Amino acid sequence: MQYQSLFSLEISHRYHASGKSEDFHILPTYRCAENLRDAGLIFRSHTHGFLVQYQARNGNDPKIPLTDQTKYSFILHQQRPDLLNFSDLPLSNQVNQIYYLDNLTKNRQEDAVLLTAETGHEFLSGLDILSLRPQSFQYRFSSSRSRVSLQIQDVFGRTIEEALVPVHDGSGSYPVALRRLSPGKFTLRLDGELAETFYASDELFRQKPFGVLDIYQHARVPSEYQFTDLGDPAAITPRKYQLNIQRRTTYWKYLFVHKYRLTELNADDWPDSWPDDYPDSLPAGWQDAWPEDWPAEWVIRYPSDPVVHMNPVPQQARALSDGYFAIPFISESPLPLSDKSIAGIELTKREEENDEEDDSEGGPPWGRGGPGRSRGHNGNHRGSGIRAIQNLPNASPRTLVVNNEEGKIYSEIFVYV
């Protein structure tokens, strides 16, 4: 018995050094499993996608003709709880939302047959998110009119339900009943205006998966996305569909934590931010202990082309809840997250950035006059200080901090010195 490829899905993710995503477990829906069995098709899942094969005879001719219009639906379950943290996707997804993909959108780029909605863009995005609904629900809306024309259409724009809905005291509701139809994508319009696009499925609504993929065997599928000719059972064109996910970029914030506790202060009493006249603005008893060149004369170098600097922001220095004291260094621009560590990130003095050798006593000031005395574990020791701390740790997707006021996402990296 010989099986040939009919269509497949390959998922890539730029976060992974391999480029391949192993972040999903994909299964056919119950109805899809029945459709595959009836058509004599085999579903094979693998770590970065899946493959659907047909039984062939006389070369590539399918043993069971694929002449019926149908749909194959596959559920994408995420394997990692922090998937959104390292993916360039909205972090604010609601529970009853789902990523929706199909082979009806013409978004081919070079050799990639993409399934995402945003044409001209190769990555999954917020435009691929739909509301997730059960197949029977009460739709509620507001309107200033006395009655509203409600219309529900399927994925091909065909009207499947229409009604005039009365409005009382500015509110209206309508019982949407779609269990007579196959689960899928629908649009709901009020007085001709789009009100909601949603995916209706009792099975998916119970499971709350990451996404769903609908592969249509239909004449409305763009020619470069079709895998069979409904008029010619022997005409099979295997299709390799592609889903690409971009990695997230964040502002890296290194927090250098001094290994001494604030014995004279409560962390709650420490100022949230400092004015530019530090160290004069430090709490009493700390002005004299504050070294003159720290942290202004220091910088973190990220070894990219061009080099990205992470500059000290002493105005955001803070006392931590455990009584330690931290000073942040923040990257000038967002940097990508990756599962492969970048080597060579180092803390160094500004004036030494281009000097291969400098015999002067340097290094972060802890251990040479600042409060507490400590030497870094990764440093090259010069006298009583440290010239540089080399091979600093990389940002992790598990330590994201969203600043809505700034519209930025930070990755916090704590370094104890």
Image (cartoon, rainbow, N blue to C red):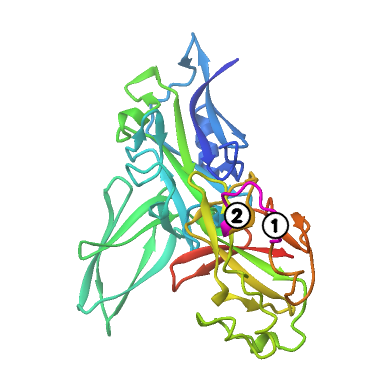
The three-letter amino acid code for the residue at tag 2 is Glu
- Residue 328 visible in this rendered orientation of the protein: yes
Asked if labels 1 and 2 touch by Cβ distance under 8 angstroms, the answer is yes
The residues tagged by marks 2 and 1 sit, at their Cα atoms, a distance apart of: 9 Å
- Image label count: 2
Above or below for 2 versus 291: above
Residue drawn 74% across and 65% down? 417
Residue 89, magenta (yes or no): no
Number of residues whose C-alpha sits closer than 10 Å to that of mark 1, classed few (under 14), some (14–19) or many (20 or more) = many
State the mark number for residue 387.
1
Secondary structure character of the magenta stretch overall: loop
Image location (x, y in percent) of residue 403: 49, 70
Image location (x, y in percent) of residue 11: 52, 38
Residue drawn 34% across and 25% down? 230
The three-letter amino acid code for the residue at tag 1 is Arg
Give the residue at the far front of this rendering.
Answer: 359
Residue drawn 60% across and 36% down? 18
Element class at badge 1: strand
Residue for badge 2:
352
Above or below for 107 versus 151: above
Residue 359, magenta (yes or no): yes
